Image: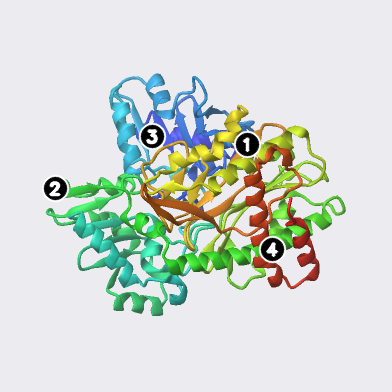
Amino acid sequence: MTTNEKIICVREEMKRRGIDALIVLTEDPHGSEYPANHWKFREFLSGFNGSAGVMVVTNDHAGLWVDSRYYIQGEKQLRGSSIELFKVGQPNVPDYVTYLTNILPSESVVGVDGFTMPLATYRKVKKELAKFGIVLNYKVDIIDEVYAPREELPTDEVIEMDPSIAGLNRLQKVEALRKVMLENNVTHYIASALDDIAWLTNLRGNDVEYCPVFYAYMIITATEEHLYIDPHKLSSVISKRLDEDGVKLSLYDHFEKNISNLPSDARVFIDTNSLNARIALSLPKEVVRVEDSSYIGKLKAIKSPDELNHIYASHVRDGIAMVKFLHWLDDNIGKARLTELDVAAKLRDFRAQNHLFVSESFESIAAYGSNSAIVHYSPSIESNAELKPEGFLLLDTGAQYADGTTDITRTIALGELTEEACKDYTLVLKGHIALATVRFPYGTRGVQLDTMARMHLWREGEDYGHGTGHGVGFCLNVHEGPQRISKTDNGVVIEPGMVTSNEPGVYREGKHGVRIENLIACVDDVDTEFGKFLRFRTITLCPIDVRPIVVSMLTEGERKWLNDYHRKVRATLIELLADSSDREWLDKVTKEI
């Protein structure tokens, strides 16, 4: 079916169920950034495959709401359809809830699949619609009627992390959680975020592309842990070990029913931003709901010394793969026909040479020329641009290793550049260095650090629409909370042990995009009479292209940071490169400027 034919089918189902508008979200029941194909209804319906966006279908209109990361991509992928693109954040563009209140009469019914809507979102949408006499029905599931053939939920086998890599064992992690539960007078803890469950159990899966997680729910009490999972995913060995550790197994599909039978005197923890509305609203009305951000999320965000050491080691291996790739690219650009898909595949091949490589950590962004101005662009057969010995290649990639997760962006000069491109590159680099070198007092939040990365761009009247930094998991999701560095304050303090990205950028539609990203670990710095101060340790090891730099724009301190960084990259990697030509190339590109 075409996109328009799919929308017609949706409208037929809406009419049959008495629905005046349907909200179609991106999430699966666990709020995953990358849902399994089983849950990709919005992508199926619209043809837009960005990782964020909301679609609304009414009886005579369809719209897709996207943020600034997807303006250009949305325009391209919706061409030829009847779907209108709404650019969130632009002047006079209503959000999808306001849009619904503007067009629907009182007593209209808006439908949504409550499994795909977090409780916090459900409450907000319901409240706003109710002001206009509009009802929100959270039990509308029409996916099976329209999304055909719909893939089944994944059944891949779950594996157990090597104890020498995992650090704390399951029992230790559960005890740490129970301590927090006790402090907050919680009797029952509901875990629904897949990475929370994977971290707590020291299990990993393959249900969600790029993220080593598996579909499951958990309930933890003072004396028991219940894991709701498809039992076919567990080997007899893992099932036995879970049993020995006191983990009781139940069927994944039984979770909604079981949650409705909790004792009436329970004090139940729920994270309203991750627990879906369908499950949350199944809780008995009598139980006390303790609402907060994920306790597990806070525990796993602060990496242990053992975890950090493994993360550092994985970045050494990732750096070796990056050096081999960048050398190969330098040798072949302008001599062989290369496309965006070619270079993304080649880098994956270099990473896969390491025996601890598991997968990429997200869909590679290999964006050449004007494509690099599309913030979350990923090449496809239709858009696959051929690289030429001129302009920028923006390469944002990452890997899952058995002992760490990586995420790195390099903007690479393939040949002649415009003066504007070089200036933009240098401004982004200055912002990157400013954040990498900042010293800040304990208690500082990400929103306070965000300005460091933007200030040089702001002075030139430039900016970027995405955040500056996101948390990164340990052999888990490449985008991990609760910490972030962005213009939006989420109230989370940056603490020692947290691993975060440092990725300022700038994008000029139709021309070029620039982004430079390393991962940084928060570490203790100094104690003074004014308190405890922290800093960042850059853990990514890969040369930064010096060819586009306008050296006169750098301060002495900025040049020193770059030269020191390159000295560290060279000293760490050069003896680990088996090929002498790779060593010679690394030595050349890391010379002082």
Give the mark nearest the N terminus, 4 or 1: 1
The residue wearing badge 2 is 286
Q: Is residue 460 above or below residue 30?
A: above
Where residue 16 is drawn, which disc sits there?
3
Give the mark nearest the N terminus, 3 or 2: 3
Using residue 98 as the reference point, say whether residue 324 is left or right of it: right
Q: Is residue 231 above or below residue 541?
A: below
Q: Nearer the viewer, mark 2 or mark 4?
A: 4
Secondary structure beneath dot 4 equals: helix
Marks 2 and 4, Cα distance to the nearest angstrom? 62 Å
How many C-alpha atoms fall within 10 Å of the one at disc 1: few (<14), some, or many (≥20)? many
Query: In front: 187, or 578?
Result: 578
Using residue 347 as the reference point, say whether residue 88 is left or right of it: left
Could you tell me if residue 408 is visible in this image? Answer: yes
How many C-alpha atoms fall within 10 Å of the one at disc 3: few (<14), some, or many (≥20)? few
Q: Is residue 227 above or below residue 4?
A: below
Marks 1 and 2, Cα distance to the nearest angstrom? 51 Å
The residue wearing badge 1 is 506
Where residue 570 is drawn, which disc sits there?
4
